[in-house]
Amino acid sequence: MKPRQCIHCHTEIVGRADKKFCDAMCRSAYFYRRHTQRAEEVRRINTILNNNRKILLQLIEAGSPQASWHRIQLEKLGFAFRFCTHTIPWSRKTEAVFCYDVGYIQVNDRITIIEPDPLENMLPQVKAS
């Protein structure tokens, strides 16, 4: 039978057959590391989303409400098109893409920025009985 190893420190485990860690410290260290790695990934994504939102708000302030920008202009400002919080169908061929409360519509390579009502107004309303 192959000796079992602790999944954190890789030392040989003695004891129950279903044991995964050599002691409580290894178990704690393993789950702490796993939790902090996941939290770091969430922070990284939130940073990208906040940057995207900031860029959209800057462009709203810079132009008229119906102004549109070329996709390359947003990319030069650091906009990451791969990241969004949600999408909403806009027409048969397009959908609005949002970074929190600010969104945009892309038709070909032109981006039109939209600033919707607060998100509470977009959520389905629950009828009180």
Image: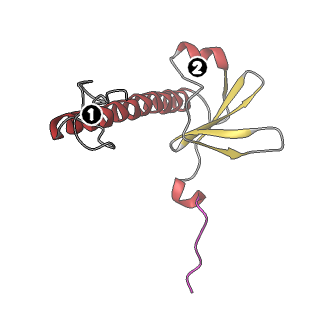
In the rendered structure, the answer to whether residue 87 lies left or right of residue 61 reads: right
* Residue identifier under label 1: 30
Amino acid type, residue under disc 1 in the picture: Tyr
Magenta stretch encompasses residue 124: yes
Residue 80 horizontal/vertical position (percent): 55, 23
Outermost residue, front side: 1
Between label 1 and label 2, give the one nearer the viewer.
1
89 and 36: which is toward the camera: 36
Q: Residue at x 29, y 33 (%)?
A: 36
- Secondary structure beneath label 1: helix
Q: Is residue 110 above or below residue 87?
A: above
Which residues are drawn in magenta? 123-129
Residue 14 horizontal/vertical position (percent): 22, 35
Residue 75 horizontal/vertical position (percent): 58, 16
Magenta stretch encompasses residue 36: no
Quadrant of the rendering where the C terminus is positioned? bottom right
In the rendered structure, the answer to whether residue 118 lies left or right of residue 106 reads: left
Q: Residues within 10 Å of mark 2 (few under 14, many from 20)?
A: some
Q: Main secondary structure of the magenta part?
A: loop
Q: Is residue 70 above or below residue 105?
A: above
Label annotation for residue 74: 2
Q: Residue at x 50, y 17 (%)?
A: 78
Q: Residue at x 58, y 39 (%)?
A: 98
**Which image quadrant is residue 3 in?**
top left
Q: What is the CA distance from the residue labelled 1 to the residue labelled 2? A: 41 Å
Residue 39 horizontal/vertical position (percent): 34, 35
Q: Is residue 92 above or below residue 121?
A: above
- Give whichever of discs 1 and 2 has the lower sequence position: 1
Quadrant of the rendering where the N terminus is positioned? top left
